[in-house]
Amino acid sequence: MKQRVVITGLGVVAPNGVGVPRFTEAIKKGTSGIEYYSQLKELNFSCQIGGIPVISEVKKREYLTELQLKNFNSSGILYGVIAGMDALRDAGIPPSEKGNDPHWDLGIVFGTGTSGVEKFREAIYKLDEGKVRRLGSTTVAQTMASGISAYLGGIIGAGNLVTTNSSACATGTEAIIMGYERIASGKASKMLCGSTSDDGPYLWGGFDAMKVITYKHNDTPTKASRPMSATASGFVPGSGAGALVLESLESALKRGVTIYAEVLGGAVNSGGQRGEGSMTAPNNEAVQRCIKAALDDAGITASEIDYINGHLTATTKDPVEIENWCNALNRRGKNFPHINSLKGMVGHCLAASGSVEAVSAILQLYHGFVFPNVNCEDLHPEITALIASEKIPQELLTTPLKTIAKASFGFGDVNACVIFRKN
Amino acid sequence: MTTEAIYTKLLPIVQTYLPEDVVVDQVSPDSDLTQELNINSAHLVDIILDVEDEFDVEFANEDMENLRTMNDAIGIIQQKLS
């Protein structure tokens, strides 16, 4: 029999707030985490702004030992470890004691796009100088794609599936669905799901070269990320990590822990880079099929959706996403659910976006609010032609939510959509 | 450089890699680094890199194979410095 799956722990490291309490306050206020970075200017970036979480040296040492921090140079692993361990602590799951068995029923799916790009750069310089023997023992662990799940697995002592998924900007949402499926099928009782992304020029450079990030707001960083705006001019690169502990309802009730929401179901698919689909753009039919498949998997109708946490990156393609939601749900105008995009505040956290945004979605569902959309005072006319502007709140809206959808779409024409419910 | 002088410089390097449940007082010249002090064997290469920086020497692959204890390290360092 299919197990019901609930969320019992949350953790987040975002450019506008590290830790769930600070992040909750920031998203309620619409606080921006986007700043100007002179390093990007020095490197001749067109876009010289970005979103980077602020982590003190003291904070690092709450999560990693001095030895782990020696020669450590992987921002993504740092963010992922903080978010992941916060989520596990929130769920009341302590590290397994040294000498004891691992938690056989706890697994991890923690995604990323790349791992330790700064460490990799460091290694390449040494290598090219003929000093391969000077790389040290942790270059592999910091630069392997599964570095983040390996670090987390070792710190907590996870004994079930421990892996890293990677599907570009759909990574975080996909991780939640993979963890959900593993628990639903009875193969694990708890799964730490999430994703992380490195920060900085060596990750962001390729996007700058593609001209998909905005160059128009180097002097006005907090105004730069403009999802759903008529003046959206490209996304702002971000970074960070989000983490959720998924658990069988049975296990959560037995442990008597806080249940934030139920994962009703979800779906992933690809447009095969056919039709409008390409390496960088989605096939619209695939997007709509993914949303509909998530509703089917959750066993609900489109009319039950109260709120959508959009992908909405602040490129010129935002109206296309809105149209896809309208067609998939067959809801328009004032009948459309509330929708918002976290990217206005934190930028596009790339591989981390799905999980950071999913944490924001669960917080809204659990506490009953819709955070303000920032920087869309000039809503795109193609969007207001589809849905009522009041469905895109620009002030904090306090309202009970019951059933919500989160979707992410990534390079490679891949899609992921998940449905959460507060019972 | 005297054995004592080398040991004094070597101890803090090795200390960095001790597991949390091993204290520096447990380290003696004869301690086997991985078997007795429970240092992760992957970290032996890091210890060697730190030693190379501290003493301005370079270990060969063969030297690494012969490194088991603090005394082994001291012996190799003395040989390189002489």
Image (spheres, grey):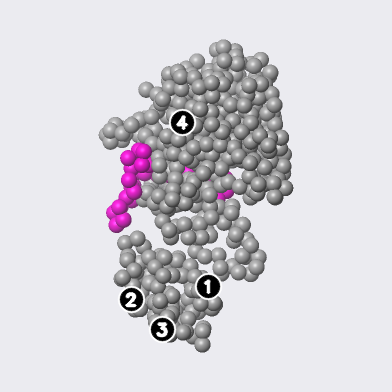
Magenta stretch in the rendered image: A88-115
CB under 8 Å between discs 4 and 3: no
In terms of secondary structure, where does tag 3 sit?
Answer: helix
Residue that mark 2 sits on = B28
Residue B3 in the image: x percent, y percent? 41, 83
Q: What crowding class fits label 1: few (fewer than 14 Cα within 10 Å), some (14-19), or many (20 or more)?
A: few
Picture quadrant where residue A321 is located: top right
The percent position of residue B34, horizontal first and vertical second, equals 38, 70
Q: Which chain is home to disc 4?
A: A
Residue at disc 1, secondary structure = helix
On the rendered image, what quadrant is the N terminus of chain A found in? top left
Q: Chain of mark 3?
A: B
Q: Which residue is mark 4?
A: A25
Q: Amino acid at mark 4?
A: Glu
The kind of residue on which mark 2 rests is Ser
> Do callouts 1 and 4 mark residues in contact (Cβ within 8 Å)?
no
